[in-house]
Image (tube, rainbow, N blue to C red):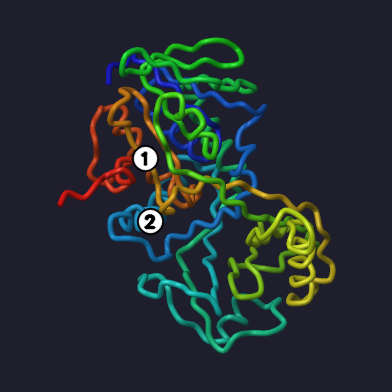
Amino acid sequence: MSKNQKVIIVGAGIVGASIAYNLSKVHQDITLVESHSKAGCGVTSNSFAWINPSGRVPENFQHLYDGSLAEYHVLEKEIPELKVDWNGSLSWGIPVNINKSYVEKITGQQVSDLEPHLKEYPKEALYAFKEGAVDPNILTNLLLKKAQENGVNILFDTKVTQVKKEDAKVVGIHTSKGFIESDVIVLANGTALPELCKPLGIEVPVESSPSIIIRMKSSKKLIHTLISNSRFEARQLSDTMLIAAEDYLDDHGKNGPEEIGKRALETLRYDLVDGEHLELESIKVGMRPMPKDGYPIVGFHDEVKGLYLAVMHSAITLSPVISRLIAKEIVDNVQLEELEGCRLSRFYQVNEI
């Protein structure tokens, strides 16, 4: 890519921030546009933020998950202010991929040693000792701070209303504050991405997948790893804040977010020693952008030159490793083999008879 080419990134969540950071290390003419007044206001702020590559995934995505832990360690060296909680995760009573080299079976006594505030212990559990977790807001803002230091221009309170193209090439975006010219447009705006693509005649199979995040004030640290079992999924965000994740069932009633959040609080109060002192701070729903098959959609569009799509779940796990590859594709104008399984075209390929 020529240094005078202009790149616009739409969306300042963890994906957009990661791309901006990686691009800023090799390219200066970058503008990041965000509709909210600050970064990470969407699903990023309501993320459980578990760096969790141990799930079962198809072979053509496995290398991306496998590279996620190493990429976070690189990020820690590049951004010393970043603090990743590397205390691992404990799971029991739920499916876990035990084929990972860093997942081991441990006894109930070992669980007790790791988590002394549990009232009851399983006979055995799986300990993914290399996994971690982050504060998603701190991570996103650190990435953007470094990106700005490297020359990225960030426009908050700026809503993108339309991607403009001439012939088969993007030329810029219309926003609430006027038109911005560009040569490359990276759409990293999550669930809003499909709507921006529709006027271009592009269907992107991404839907909103809601999840519930419950934040609780804690007088002291009650959980040391990240615990995922049949009763709860929770971790310490800080010494004085505990967060739990729950599945979204309905928008109201006994299965609505408020009631589910209150039940999660009561479960943790019951299951943890000194848990009775937990106080509910907030119950929020995050609308995760979920591709139809559950795996990332990444890459230049085949028919609209300069349009780059970037949407993924789980973004916390994948965005550091994928955004580094994205930056290389954009700067060098190449298609990397590592991202071939992520292309939008996989949804529209017709098997030849």
Q: Which residue is mark 2?
A: 65
The residue depicted at 53 percent of the width and 68 percent of the height is 89
Check the image and name the residue furthest to the left. 353
Q: Quadrant of the image for the N terminus?
A: top left
In the rendered image, is residue 323 in sight? yes
In the rendered image, is residue 240 in sight? no
119 above or below 278? below
Work out whether residue 171 or residue 325 is closer to the camera in this orientation and state it: 171
Check the image and name the residue furthest to the bottom. 123
Crowding near the residue tagged with mark 1, few <14, some 14–19, many ≥20 C-alpha atoms within 10 Å: many
Which disc is residue 258 wearing? none
User: Percent from the top left, x then y, of residue 341?
Assistant: 29, 48
The residue depicted at 28 percent of the width and 60 percent of the height is 59
Q: Quadrant of residue 62?
A: bottom left
* Alpha carbons under labels 2 and 1: distance apart: 15 Å
User: Percent from the top left, x then y, of residue 277?
Assistant: 84, 67
Q: Which residue is mark 1?
A: 298
